[in-house]
Amino acid sequence: MMGKKVVLACVCCGSRNYSTSSSDTQTKRLELKKFCKTCGTQTNHRETK
């Protein structure tokens, strides 16, 4: 099973740069460290609604 599709947004600027899939049983929001094209650095990206 794939899970649901989620969009990741930068916590600094709010730019929605990445999309991925997460499991259906996950209760917390997914947070990954990714490169933000707008900020130009690696920042935390959090799952949006």
Image (cartoon, grey):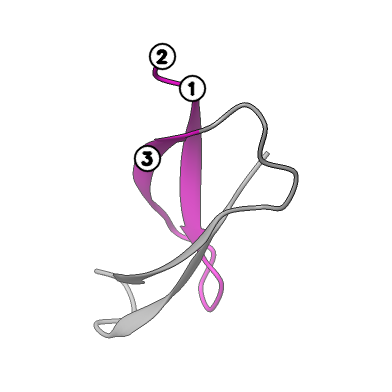
Residue under label 3: 19
Residue under label 2: 1
Mark 1 / mark 3, whichever is N-terminal: 1
Q: Is residue 31 left or right of 38 when viewed as pictured?
A: right
Q: Which amino acid does label 3 sit on?
A: Ser
Residue sitting at 57 percent across and 54 percent down?
Answer: 30
Residue under label 1: 3
Q: Is residue 42 left or right of 14 when viewed as pictured?
A: left
45 to 17, vertically: above or below: below
Helix or strand or loop: what does disc 3 sit on?
Answer: strand
Q: Main secondary structure of the magenta part?
A: strand
25 to 13, vertically: above or below: above
Q: CA–CA distance between discs 1 and 3?
A: 13 Å
What is the magenta range? 1-22
The C terminus sits in image quarter? top right
Q: Which amino acid does label 2 sit on?
A: Met
Is residue 9 in the magenta section? yes
Q: CA–CA distance between discs 1 and 2?
A: 6 Å
Q: What residue type is labelled 1?
A: Gly
> 47 and 26: which one is in front?
26
Q: Residue 48: give x, y in percent of width and height.
A: 62, 46
Q: Residue furthest top?
A: 1
Residue sitting at 45 percent across and 59 percent down?
Answer: 15
Q: CA–CA distance between discs 3 and 2?
A: 17 Å
